[in-house]
Image: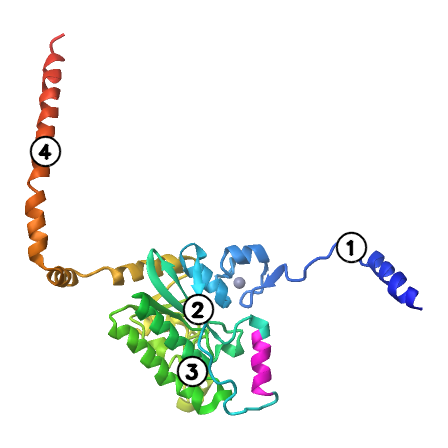
Amino acid sequence: MNWLTNFVRPKLRALVSSKPEVPDNLWHKCPNCEAMIFHRDLETNLHVCQHCGYHMRLKAARRLEMLFDDGDYTAIELPKSAVDPLRFRDTKRYTDRLREAQTKTGHNDAITVAHGLIGGNKAVIAVFDFQFMGGSMGTAVGEGLLAAAKLAVLQDAALIAVPASGGARMQEGILSLMQMPRSVIAIDLVKDAGLPYIVILTDPTTGGVTASFAMLGDIHIAEPGAQIAFAGARVIEETIRETLPDNFQTAEYLLEHGMVDIVVHRQRLRETLARIVDMLRRPTPAAQVVALNADGPATIEASAEDEAPETPEEGADEAEAETAEAEPADEDRPNP
Ligand SMILES: [Zn+2]
């Protein structure tokens, strides 16, 4: 029997399944227009549907690769936080849910922090992965935001947050709500250091995340069609007993009402971000004066007096010599 099961059966199976294997994830269906999109097209279009422009959710790693110069960045290890402090259990244990999400995404929690260059300027990005328990904010995320803010201050870099979150993580109860003021303190560290803090609002940015760090940016960029809200539309509708407009809580609606500064297509997100970071990092004329005064204007003037007069004279002599040579040639030509 051993011979049959160990030798004959695998041989037969190999014969039967010798057809070339076709991966089943070559085609993706757009959740908006239901068009079928080839996986390579999806990748080149940065997961934006080429038929209707629908922006699909991105994994954290892809987002970082897309935003940093040449897709080059270094992710940092985040400090460990207490796992399951409340020993929470609903239909599953919280620890089991965490483990599942970690296996699925390859990340420790919903946030990833990385540093690198954007348009040649130093930047730290804290990005959320919605696949990790709906990008919910627990102590690990609070810890991550604090680490990102400290790193930005340490490196004298801009901080960019890219939330994609359903809000606070209910499995951590009050501890998850405490991350709201904690993340605000983190952002204050960056603002106190005079560094830019930019938020890229992606689909969805809701709940406690919207009610804290996600709405405190110097500039708010949003992706087209992204849902940005605190409470859900249905809850609001039931509370105020009024019908809400169709595009309520979308990036475009928030732009119209002044909550968002720009809505940018994903293809142009990197260049827009680079331009904004560059503008905010460029020293203002007032800052340049302060910098000059700090260095001591006397030394700068003295060196300018020593060297400056010599070079222009030399330059002038050369220029004169050149014109002197050129002039006779011009005079010669009209007389053949
Ligand atoms: Zn589509």
Left or right placement of residue 290 versus residue 150 in this view = left
Please give the label number shown on residue 207.
3
**Residue at 30% across / 70% down in the picture?**
153
Q: Which of marks 2 and 1 is in front?
A: 2
**Residue at 41% across / 79% down in the picture?**
143
Given contact means CB atoms under 8 Å apart, are the residues at marks 3 and 2 in contact? no
Among numbered discs 3 and 1, the one appearing first in the sequence: 1
| Amino acid tagged 1 | Lys
Indicate the position of residue 212 as horizontal and vertical percent values. 36, 81
Q: Distance between the residues labelled 4 and 1?
A: 80 Å
Among numbered discs 2 and 1, the one appearing first in the sequence: 1
On the image, numbered disc 1 is attached to which residue? 19
On the image, numbered disc 2 is attached to which residue? 76
Indicate the position of residue 232 as horizontal and vertical percent values. 45, 83
Tag 1: Cα neighbours inside 10 Å, few (<14), some, or many (≥20)? few
| Amino acid tagged 2 | Ile
Indicate the position of residue 272 as horizontal and vertical percent values. 35, 59
| Amino acid tagged 3 | Gly
Among numbered discs 4 and 2, the one appearing first in the sequence: 2
Q: Main secondary structure of the magenta part?
A: helix
User: Number of marks in the image?
Assistant: 4
Q: How far apart are marks 4 and 2 (CA)?
A: 54 Å
Start and end of the magenta stretch? 93-102
